[in-house]
Image (tube, rainbow, N blue to C red):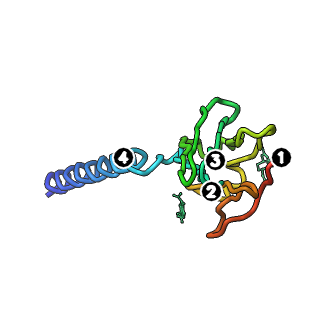
């Protein structure tokens, strides 16, 4: 009787260990499956040229002072800036937009601390200036410098 109880206990431990292993595996899998993982997040910042036919929008962005490159966006086209950020990094995306005018518009395209746009941020540029998409509407943010 004593022996069977012991054997029973031993098999219990084994199945518990198996369950635990499965649980640990699942926990380890989550960061691989989830978009951006547990500690990082994928950020996409879209910028659309609504300036008018024949006007090219020139963009240049820096993320935390690191070079992200230049983009030329034709009328009615959208470009996208993608990066992965750490959850607690407080990153910013600072960009310059210009239309080959004398002065360029320098603006804060993304500020993690404010996180106005969550995973997907939208900007559009018209002759009036720059608008940011926030809570379902376009908010006027910047005028073109003279
Ligand atoms: C630009 O996009 C707007 C809105 O989608 C459309 O009405 C217009 O015809 C487009 N213009 C050109 C030149 O593609
Ligand atoms: C980003 O947002 C935080 C919180 O509102 C603010 O303190 C910080 O100055 C902003 N960063 C920049 C570069 O404006």
Give the camera-side residue of 95 and 73: 73
User: Label 1, on which residue?
Assistant: 145
Residue at the extreme bottom of the image, as rendered: 136
Give the secondary structure at mark 3.
Answer: loop
Q: Which residue is mark 4?
A: 29
Number of the front mark, 2 or 4: 2
Reading the image, the residue beneath label 3 is 55
Residue 50 numbered mark, or none: 2
Spatial CA distance of label 1 from label 3 is 17 Å
How far is mark 1 from mark 2, CA to CA?
17 Å
First along the sequence among labels 1 and 2:
2
Residue 66: % across, % down: 65, 30
Question: Could you tell me how far apart the alpha carbons at marks 1 and 4 are, in whole angstroms?
Answer: 49 Å
- Foreground: disc 1 or disc 3: 3
Point out the tag, 4 or 3, that comes first from the N-terminus. 4
In space, the residues marked 3 and 2 are separated at their CA atoms by 9 Å
Q: Which mark is residue 33?
A: none
- The N terminus, quarter of image: bottom left
First reached walking from the N terminus: tag 1 or tag 3: 3
Q: Do callouts 4 and 3 mark residues in contact (Cβ within 8 Å)? A: no
* Within-10-Å neighbours for mark 2: few <14, some 14–19, many 20+: many
Residue 99 in the image: x percent, y percent?
70, 43
- Tags 1 and 4 in contact by the CB under 8 Å rule? no
The residue located at (50%, 48%) in the rendering is: 38
């Amino acid at each position: 009787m004593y022996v069977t109880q012991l054997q029973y206990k031993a098999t219990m431990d084994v199945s518990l260990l198996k369950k635990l292993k499965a649980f640990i595996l699942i926990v380890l899998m989550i960061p691989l499956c989830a978009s951006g993982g547990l500690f990082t997040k994928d950020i996409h910042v879209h910028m659309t040229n609504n300036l008018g036919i024949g006007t090219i929008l020139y963009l240049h962005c820096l993320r935390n002072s690191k070079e992200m490159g230049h983009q030329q966006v034709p009328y009615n086209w959208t470009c996208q800036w993608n990066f992965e950020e750490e959850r607690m990094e407080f990153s910013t995306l600072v960009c310059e937009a210009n239309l080959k005018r004398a002065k360029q518009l320098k603006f804060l395209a993304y500020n993690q601390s404010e996180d106005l746009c969550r995973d997907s941020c939208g900007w559009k540029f018209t002759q009036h200036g720059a608008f940011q998409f926030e809570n379902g509407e376009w908010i006027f943010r910047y005028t073109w410098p003279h």
